[in-house]
Image: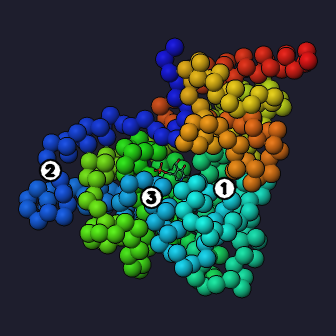
Amino acid sequence: MTAIYLDNNATRKIYKEVIEAMKETYSVPLNASSIHSFGRNAKRLLEQSRSKISQFLHADNYNVIFTSSGTESNNQVIRGFSDYKKLISSIEHPSLYRAADDIYKIPVDNNGIVNLLALKKLLVGGPKKTLVSVMHANNETGIIQPVVEIAKICKENGILFHTDAVQTFGKVNFKIDDLSPDFMTISAHKIGGPQGAAALLVRKNFAPFPFLKGGGQEFGFRAGSENIPAIVGFAKAVEITQDKMNQLSQIGILRDYMENKLKQICPEIVIIGEDALRIVNTSCIIMPNVANDVQLVHFDLKNIAVSSGAACSSGKVEASYVLQAMNVPQDKVKNAIRVSLSLDNNYKEIDNFIEAWQELYLRNKDSNAAA
Ligand code: PLP
């Protein structure tokens, strides 16, 4: 059976057109800091790419700083404000919560939504020099956060606000000014671009706070020769994504079809955040009585790629801190898997996944009943 890829929040298959665009750049030397014609060519490609990404987000009021990854962008913000009090939600990506030791967590409610009252309380009487970071949507559950309100609260209190939009960029239709953060993280490989290119959008009134120090590249915000092939690929992926934004609802229909079928098979199933606002491609599913590592192996044997949503770099499945922060009971946390779709997926693939899910569910249901 051909492989079925349902792990698009981890990374999305790179578009062929992106590879083609990148290939062309590899045939010439490209250092955007050089003053000769080759350098000017590199600079032109760099600035065209920057404009494309800026236009997509309507980011006239922001500088688009190219970085190597969403991880780097997140680290840059947290480390760039080392003398600030840092408040982040309890469901942020490790590239935020591991970026510094002195980080305070904002709780989320049982629906996975940041508790705005708790945030306000944490800000009252706190230092003016505070940085808040709340992701636009969570990578494990797809639940979208009230970033507009959070940005407003921060503005009212004169507090800096960063949002990690890695999982919503290209999956949710928004202009950056709709959310109005001071800083925003995006990453190319989640939308069909290459790994090795990402960006930090910084409101234009900020002086550079470089994480990597050296040359004056990226308006002084990020030293190091720009990765022009990857950046060109990033911009191409944005161009393709822009053309497909009006097809996003199709992914949602496919995801809802899958969830409804699974609910018919198993009424006790839990879909995390089912009633919350979610990105259309993501489903966090709890199969009763079957641990997620057992599920992952079962699907892998069927050549279906899904994820636990919380695999650490060693590949070991760990209990999800995101679900724990949402007070999901332990016996459910360990049974959760993440299915994340893209426009590449189709009904046949989803039917195969449902069939494999049902097989495992029924096998364990019977054995539990017999026990
Ligand atoms: N933030 C979120 C929400 C993510 O899902 C990821 C990647 O999974 C990252 C940041 C890190 O991005 P990158 O893989 O580009 O380092």
* Residue 129 circle label: none
Q: Residue at x 69, y 23 (%)?
A: 357
- Name the residue beneath numbered marker 2: 29
**Is the residue indicated by label 1 positioned so its CB lies within 8 Å of ligand 1?**
no
User: Residue 187, percent across and down?
Assistant: 44, 52
User: Residue 298, percent across and down?
Assistant: 65, 21
Front residue of 140/351: it is 140
Mark 3 packing: few (<14 Cα in 10 Å), some, or many (20+)?
A: many
- Name the residue beneath numbered marker 1: 91
Point out the tag, 2 or 1, that comes first from the N-terminus.
2
* Residue 72 circle label: 3
Which amino acid does the dot numbered 2 rest on? Pro
User: How far separated are the C-alphas under marks 3 and 1?
Assistant: 18 Å
Q: Quadrant of the C terminus?
A: top right
Marks 3 and 2 close (CB-CB < 8 Å): no
**Is the residue indicated by label 3 positioned so its CB lies within 8 Å of ligand 1?**
yes
Point out the tag, 3 or 2, that comes first from the N-terminus.
2
Residue 42 in the figure: left or right of residue 151: left
Q: Residue at x 19, y 64 (%)?
A: 33
Point out the tag, 3 or 1, that comes first from the N-terminus.
3
Front residue of 343/311: it is 311
Helix, strand or loop at mark 3: helix
Q: Residue at x 83, y 20 (%)?
A: 365
